[in-house]
Image: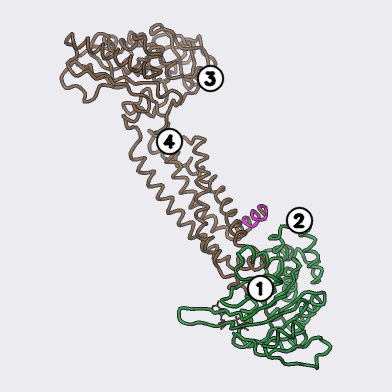
Chain colours: A green, B brown
Amino acid sequence: MLIMNNVSRIYRNDTIQTHALRDFSLAVKSGEFVAVTGPSGSGKSTFLNVAGLLDNFDQGEYTLDGVSVHGLKDDELSKLRNEKIGFIFQNYNLIPDYSIFDNVDMPLRYRGFNNAERKRRVEQALEKVGLASRASYLPSQLSGGQQQRVAIARALAGEPKILLADEPTGNLDSLMARQVMELLHNLNKEGTTIIMVTHDPDQAKEVSRNVQIIDGEISDFRIYAPLQQQDAEQTLTPAKQMEVVDA
Amino acid sequence: MLSYNLKLALQSFKRAPSLYFLVLLTLSIGVGLLCANLALVSSMAGDPIAEKSDTLFHVSMNTWPGEQPPAEPFHLLRYRDAMQISNSNIAKHSAIFYASGVYARDAQATSLKRFDSNVRATTPGFFALTKAPFAHGSAFAKSSGMEVVIGDELNKKIFAGSNSVGKTLELDGELLTIVGVLKPWFLRPLFYHATEGRAFNLTDDIYVPLETAIDLGWSNHARTSSTVSYKGIEFSRDRNVFYLQAWVQLENSAEQQAFQSYLDGYSQTLQDAGEHPHAIRNELRDVNAWLAQLKIVDQKVLAFTLASVLFLCVCVFNASSLLLSRFHSAKFEVGLRRAIGASNKHLLLQGLTESALLGLIAGVFSLLLSWLFLKLSTEFLPDLANLAVLEPKLLLLGMVLALCTAISSALYPLYRANRYTISAELK
Ligand SMILES: Nc1ncnc2c1ncn2[C@@H]1O[C@H](COP(=O)(O)OP(=O)(O)OP(=O)(O)O)[C@@H](O)[C@H]1O
Ligand SMILES: [Mg+2]
């Protein structure tokens, strides 16, 4: 689904260069649920942004769902984002004066669906996150957990191949975080590939794979999959990841 | 997509109404002022009779018999020179006239109210030459007779706009019968009498046969020059009194040449008789050449128009910086839309739709404002009254200008917005 080979992302200031990602290699298979952990400033968000085509990279190769991303034009990248990727942010990033319906509808507007199709998809997505009855509400009329579920519905509405979530439960108390995590697990079971950045080690253990990033590099690599064999924990060096994943 | 973009534009206006109102006001004032100026310039510089302006010629002659002749051939002619022109059968139409004025009332009316009226004392060729539009009746056929043609405005004042052909007017105590009534008639500039600062006057109220006016002693209300003293205009026919203007219609260059040599021949006979002390210079100027020679386009208005173009540029910069701040505060939404799959092209179109809508609204405002500017300027400068008209082509120009300025104000802000890093605003 997603293959990165020796990807580097360097932020240049007038005075300093920050290697947010250095020689970063990772492969994620279709249907996986990958948790990305690591200290603050280690490059997790940078990785997610590059993976989601929100940021470009300086070196390396990146293939998303069989398409090599390098050198694609703006509208091709936008189309990929629109059709293949769903984003979930820590701050939900809902538009405050749009109704829940209009928020979820947003990505579909750039897809060229007709009114009926958009309505069907929005309702279906809201149904999935359990908020079908709140379509006409404004974001401020919902709790944080509900708002994050709206954001998930927005990500789902376009039926993406992969969901990218940056600390989706970072702003939520544990009960609401639980609900969101359950929702993500359900979606994963239905076949959606998910990459999620998290600070919560328990959340990281629940998923099929945990990738730890330190200083822009993958430092630790655990495979928990299949979930039932959580005890058979394995540690792999980054070099071995490709062969494990492809096996 | 267009309907979605329009919806987003309205949402955007709703979010920052005061900012968009400022942008609207800025652009409207700039465009409105320029349009008002252009309205003046276009009236001043317009061709009042475009369909035949190149066949109508004003005649200037150099027959001044005294010392110190006018520097250029004189635009005013004495009666005998003018009759020479009138009697030629080379020109298809000719008009010899002077401007006068009388007090007019309906001879049958019980009211004694009289209306101060401008008079054109003219040979009958005037009507065909200037294509004066008749509503009722027709032109008088001869240069004499107690008949008149009246303009639409006077007909409205005295006869409430009805068909007054056959009625009798009392003009300075004389009774004259109406044979024709004109439709509303606008000539901007008033090419047939563009001298003596009259280029932007209205067409006349009363048209009277030339000989009748002279016989009645209706004095010339424009410039008169003479080398002799005389009691009244009725005694001017055989004297050196210069007060008549002449226009001829010549269809082609052959006719022009024929007419030129006709005039030159006439001057030559005068010279041979010792009555033409100065050089023979008979000049024919077609409508546009004549108006250009008179320099009727006010240089002050031109300068002011240039200033208002610069002012409009300042307005565009101003609107642009307002929009820049607006787009800056919408960075989050731009980032979000990009993240969920809007391309730069989508957002560019969205921005252009918004500014086009803004431009259309600004267009309506600008036209209202230019109307107001023109109204105000005629308050202060009544001379402009007949010029300050917003013609349809200017209404269109105003809309197009507003649209263009609104879009160009948004170009730089849009360019900037398209270069934001998508992830920067999204956490
Ligand atoms: N736009 C940017 N310009 C310059 N430096 C940046 C930019 N974005 C990130 N960085 C730097 O890149 C490094 C990686 O940042 P990143 O946001 O990926 O960390 P993170 O792992 O997501 O941290 P956190 O857990 O706090 O969210 C940091 O040192 C950060 O300062
Ligand atoms: Mg982060």
Residue pictured at 45% horizontal, 81% vertical: A15
* Residue at disc 1, secondary structure: loop
- Does label 1 lie on the same chain as label 3? no
Residue at image position (49%, 58%) is B320
Amino acid beneath label 3: Gly
| Separation of residues labelled 1 and 4 (CA atoms) | 58 Å
Question: Which residue bears the numbered disc 1?
Answer: A52
Which of pointers 1 and 4 indicates the residue nearer the eye?
1
Q: Are marks 1 and 4 on the same chain?
A: no
The residue that mark 4 highlights is: B42
Q: Report if the CB atoms under discs 2 and 1 are less than 8 Å apart.
A: no
Say which of B10 and A53 sits in front: A53
- Magenta stretch: give its range: B2-9
- Residue at image mark 3: B161
**Chain label for disc 1:** A
| Position of B131 relative to A16 (above/below) | above
Corner quadrant of residue A73: bottom right
